[in-house]
Amino acid sequence: MREATRGIGGQRRGRLPGCGFRRAGHRRRMMVLLLGTLVAVLVSGCLNANVSLTISENDRVSGQVLVTVPTVAGQEPLRLRPPRGLAERVQVSPYEDKGRSGTKLSFTRLTFNEVERLGRTLSNAESRYRFDLSRTGSLVMVQGSVDLTPLARTDSSVLLEINTPGEITTTNGHASSGLVSWRPKPGEVTRISATFQFSNTSEGTVWLGWTTFVGAVAIGVALLVAVLALFSHRRMRREALEEIS
């Protein structure tokens, strides 16, 4: 059985390797990849952030970033701003509900590079992550790490989930009914490891789908870290102004 290996990672690179795919022979029609939706969620007493992504055909990404904080009288609401050149496909609107206010940022059919650019625009802070994907026969292995050291001073809880139709054989995360989850800690580097067993060993469906989906995981983590870093910078600036006054 042939073994295939593809690596994904590194926001410092110009693009995410493994997110573009070669099509041997004639151009193949790809069915829409709704393998799953990545949801990376932060829940904290001050900040609620939710980043959700969905991959469709031709490696296009649609999603939403929702950030809210408790509403404080006289304080400027938290606002996210899209990068120049993406205004037509990135919509930003104010959000307010039950004593919380913030911003809802949604986007449709962006490329992987454009989503990376969106994450960098939200914050200039460095985020470091790595995901490596390999397949041997019916086994798909995911190895990686999430570096949240830039968020050491944030009081937060991060949840990363992967939902898969395959059987989970081994993982260092929490597994339940096809769902694997990890809780990376701010200020630390968390290792991600999981192995899945698939009954369908088709080259196209299993390999292409999983490579695309894990690429979405990496991008989702980058967006989440960017939002958290933005909030942390805003909070530290406010505390500095309070000390001066």
Image (cartoon, grey):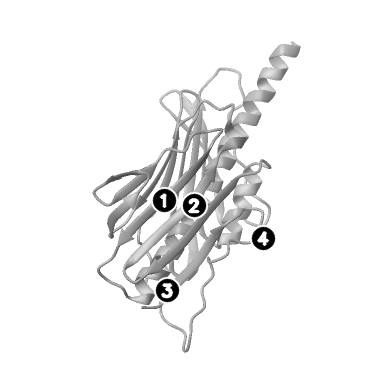
Marks 1 & 4, CB-CB < 8 Å contact: no
Residue that mark 3 sits on: 3
- Label 3 to label 2: alpha-carbon separation: 19 Å
Which of the two discs, 1 and 2, labels the residue nearer the N terminus? 2
Circle 4 sits in a helix, a strand or a loop, which is it? loop
Judge whether 187 appears above or below 3 on screen. Answer: above
Type of amino acid under label 3: Glu
In the picture, the disc for residue 193 is 1
Report the quarter where the C terminus lies: top right
Circle 1 sits in a helix, a strand or a loop, which is it? strand
Residue that mark 4 sits on: 14
Marks 1 & 2, CB-CB < 8 Å contact: yes
Residue 87: tell me if it is visible: no
Type of amino acid under label 1: Ser
Task: Using a 10 Å C-alpha cutoff, classify the residue at mark 1 as few (fewer than 14 neighbours), some (14 to 19) or many (20 or more).
Answer: some
- Label 3 to label 1: alpha-carbon separation: 19 Å
Which of the two discs, 3 and 2, labels the residue nearer the N terminus? 3
